Amino acid sequence: MPFPVSSGLLDACVLAILTRDDTYGYRLTQELTNAADVSESTLYPVLRRLQKENLLDTYEESHDGRNRRYYRITADGLRKYSFYVSAWKEFKRSMDRIIIGKEEGNNEQS
């Protein structure tokens, strides 16, 4: 992808994934790398910061004889996710007008 992923967009993506299901860091990285160039070394500081901001929390479960840390979204995280969804929709509309030259749902050029 030729567009860099900002910290705000990365936060929104992590929270979006966690609205679907709790998951662990490596799986989060795999989901994110399907859409953007994100490494584990980039992701784990984001997860720690989101946890510190009370947007997600963690728990451990045993997997193949080892504990695996899972992340889940909190109530504060859900509110922040809703904010990001609204902001994303407005950002997308603005970018579509510039890059594509039309409004969402409007087939005519602006």
Image (cartoon, rainbow, N blue to C red):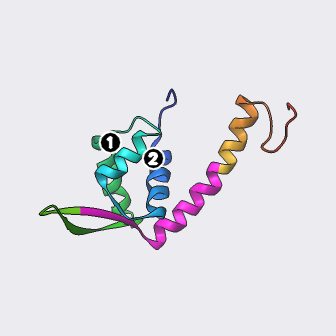
> Where 97 falls versus 12 (above or below)?
above
Residue 89 image point, x, y percent: 67, 50
Using residue 46 as the reference point, say whether residue 81 is left or right of it: right
Residue 91 in the image, given as x and y percentages of width and height: 66, 44
| Magenta span | 69-88
- Determine which residue is flagged by label 2: 10
Q: Secondary structure at mark 2?
A: helix
Q: Does residue 19 lie above or below 89 as drawn?
A: below
Q: Is residue 84 left or right of residue 64?
A: right
Q: Is residue 74 rendered magenta in the image?
A: yes
Q: Between disc 1 and disc 2, whose residue precedes?
A: 2
Quarter-wise, where is residue 32 in the image?
A: top left
Residue located 49% across and 29% down the image: 1
Q: Are marks 1 and 2 in contact (CB under 8 Å)?
A: yes
**What's the distance in space between the residues labelled 1 and 2, CA to CA?**
10 Å
Residue at 32% x, 39% y is: 39
Question: At label 2, which amino acid type do we have?
Answer: Leu
Residue in front for this viewpoint, 71 or 79:
71
> Can you say which quadrant of the picture contains the C terminus?
top right
- x%, y% of residue 49? 34, 56
Q: Is residue 90 above or below residue 64?
A: above
Amino acid carrying mark 1 in the image: Thr
Judging by the rendered image, the residue that carries numbered circle 1 is 42
- Neighbour tally class for label 2: few under 14, some 14-19, many 20 plus, Cα within 10 Å: some
Reply yes or no: does residue 16 show up in magenta: no
50 to the left or right of 89: left
